[in-house]
Amino acid sequence: MEIRDCKFDDHALYDVENHSWVRPLNDQMIIGIDSILLWLTGPLHSITLPEPGRVLERGRVLGSVESARHFDVVRAPITCLIQEVNTNILSLPIAVNKDPYNSGWLVKARPLQREELKHLRSAEEASRFLEQMIVNLRIHCFKEFPDHELYEIGVECSALLLRLNDLLSRSEPGTVVHIVTDDPLADIEVVRWADQTGNLLIESRPEGNLKHLLVKKKV
């Protein structure tokens, strides 16, 4: 399901207030965090997770996520026994941003009080609440999650493109950059830049006097 361009797994149940979700897997539950928290936080650079074997009560701190602009704790959506942690995301935290409902899961756990599942809601059941939260928090979800963000307010597009070129010259193919600019000609100039360089303009979206541009380095 998509709500204002933010994706939610139709097979998961959500602890909406705490931005976490669970999905059944045989006799286990996979636990992760939702798109709202990830777009609010931005590209993650640090994640902490509990040790396997630990019992967590519903609402207790399961771990934490941190980016350049935001730190938040992750709370357990159900009382559970931690059985496995996703070690891949500890060395590559942005994988959670990129694919939160699949390869970006946090832990696998055994539920200890299944009746607590009644406190969770499907994306469809929570859709109105989720949409209101997205609006209130001014969340912007895009087609792809950016690896970098450039906030270029009060900067002419020529200078913006110089900084963008410098960033991409030091980046891997496929790198995605989110640009925020107030230059009224930025979208036209970035289209021209993409044609000249072979890089991609994935998305352009206005917000008041600002423009959000999503570009991707050619592969």
Image (cartoon, rainbow, N blue to C red):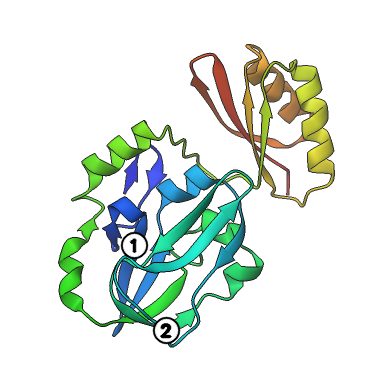
Q: Secondary structure at mark 2?
A: loop
Name the side, left or right, on which 113 lies relative to 188: left
Query: What residue does disc 1 label?
Result: 21
Report the front residue among 156 and 133.
133
Amino acid identity at mark 1: Trp
Q: Nearer the viewer, residue 36 or 68?
A: 68
Query: Can you say whether 206 is above or below 17 in the image?
Result: above
What kind of element bears circle 1?
strand
Query: Percent from the top left, x then y, of residue 218?
Result: 73, 44
Residue 3 % position (x, y)? 33, 41
The percent position of residue 62, horizontal first and vertical second, equals 43, 69
Q: Which residue is painted at 24% across and 42% down in the image?
A: 129
Q: Is residue 43 above or below residue 78?
A: above
Residue furthest to the bottom in view is 53
Above or below, comparing residue 91 to residue 184 in the picture: below
Q: Residue at left 28%, top 35%? A: 132
Cα distance in 3D space between marks 2 and 1: 19 Å
Identify the amino acid type marked 2. Arg
- The part of the image, by quadrant, that contains residue 161 is top right
- Comparing marks 2 and 1, which lies closer to the viewer? 2
Q: Against 171, is 118 above or below?
A: below
Residue drawn at x 71%, y 18% is: 189
Q: Position of residue 5 (x, y in %)?
A: 40, 39
Which residue lies under the disc numbered 2?
Answer: 54
| Residue 82 placement: quadrant | bottom left
**Residue in the picture at 21% in, 79% down:** 113
Q: Is residue 81 left or right of residue 99?
A: left
